[in-house]
Image (tube, grey):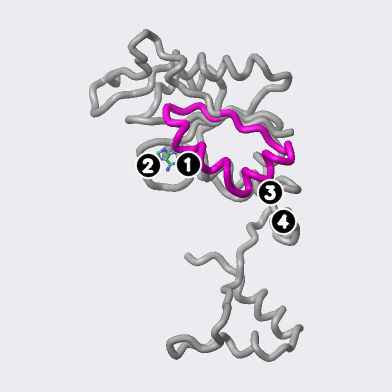
Amino acid sequence: MHNYYVVTLFPELIEPYLAHLPFKRALEKNLIQVRLVNLRDFAIDKRGTVDSPPYGSGPGMILRPEPLYNAVQSVAKGLTNNPRIIFLTPRGKTFNQQIAQEIAKAENMILICGRYEGFDQRVVEELQAEELSIGKYVLSGGEAAATVVLECSIRLIPGAIDNAKALVNESFNTANVEHPQYARPQTWRGRSVPKILTEGHHKKIASWKLSAKAWVE
Ligand code: ADE
C-alpha cells in the first residue's frame, strides 16, 4: 500500500481526479491511499490565517511556516516509516519519468501545494523536504502540479492500469514514448496513413514503430 498525502488550500481542485483512472482503480484495489489535507485546518488563528506579506517587501502573500509544518507533522506522526516530503514549486527540480518511477515505489509521500507567491523557505529546510517543479513556467498554485505528479506515478504501480505492456516499456526508466498512431479512415482530407502500416508486413511495421518513437521537441 502506498500512502499519498496532499496538503493544499484547495482539496476540491484535486478531488475530482480520484474518481478516474489511474486513481480510481488503484484506490479500489487498495494499492494506494490518497488523503487530501486542508491547510486551512492548521491556520494560526480563528480567522483562518495561513499567509503573511513577504520580508524584504514584494508583491502578494507568502504561506507562513507554522501551518505548513503543523499540517505535515500531523500526517507524519501517524506513519511508521519516514515519508518523502515534496513541496511543489517552479523553483524545484524538474519532474520526469524517472522521479515518477521512484514515487511509484515510495511507501509514504507528502506533497505540499504552494499558493499565492510561495511559501516560507525555512519550513522546507526544517522538514528536510525536496522541491519539485513540473516545468519551467509558473502556475497559480501547486494543485495542478501535485495532480500531474500523482497521476504519472500512480499509473506505474502494477495493477493500476490495464495496459501491462506500457509498464514493461516504462520500467526501463525511459518513458513509453509512443510512435504516432492512426485510426480509420485510411485517407482523411487527402492525408493517408503511412503505407507501411497498411501492408501487413509485421517486421517492417515493428521497425517503423521503433524508428518513429521520439519526444516531440
Ligand atoms: N507551482 C507554481 N508553478 C509550479 C510549477 N511549474 N511546478 C510545480 N509547482 C508549481
Residue bounds of the magenta highlight: 6-35
Report the residue at 48% width, 41% height from top. Answer: 145
**Residue labelled 2 has its Cβ within 8 Å of some atom of ligand 1:** yes
Relative to residue 4, is residue 131 drawn left or right?
Answer: left
Separation (CA) of disc 2 from disc 3? 25 Å
According to the image, label 2 marks what residue? 139
Separation (CA) of disc 4 from disc 3? 11 Å
**Residue labelled 1 has its Cβ within 8 Å of some atom of ligand 1:** yes
Instruction: Identify the element where label 1 is drawn.
Output: helix
In the depicted structure, whether residue 17 falls above or below residue 212: above
According to the image, label 4 marks what residue? 162
The reply to whether dot 2 and dot 1 touch (C-beta < 8 Å) is yes
Instruction: Identify the element where label 3 is drawn.
Output: loop
Report the residue at 71% width, 85% height from top. Answer: 204
Q: Quadrant of the N terminus?
A: top right
According to the image, label 3 marks what residue? 156
Q: Is residue 154 magenta?
A: no
User: Which numbered circle lies on residue 39?
Assistant: none
Q: Is residue 13 magenta?
A: yes
Please report whichever mark, 1 or 3, sits nearer to the chain's N-terminal start. Answer: 1
Occupied quadrant, residue 91: top left
Relative to residue 48, is residue 123 drawn left or right?
Answer: right
Separation (CA) of disc 4 from disc 1? 24 Å
Separation (CA) of disc 1 from disc 3? 17 Å
Please report whichever mark, 2 or 4, sits nearer to the chain's N-terminal start. Answer: 2
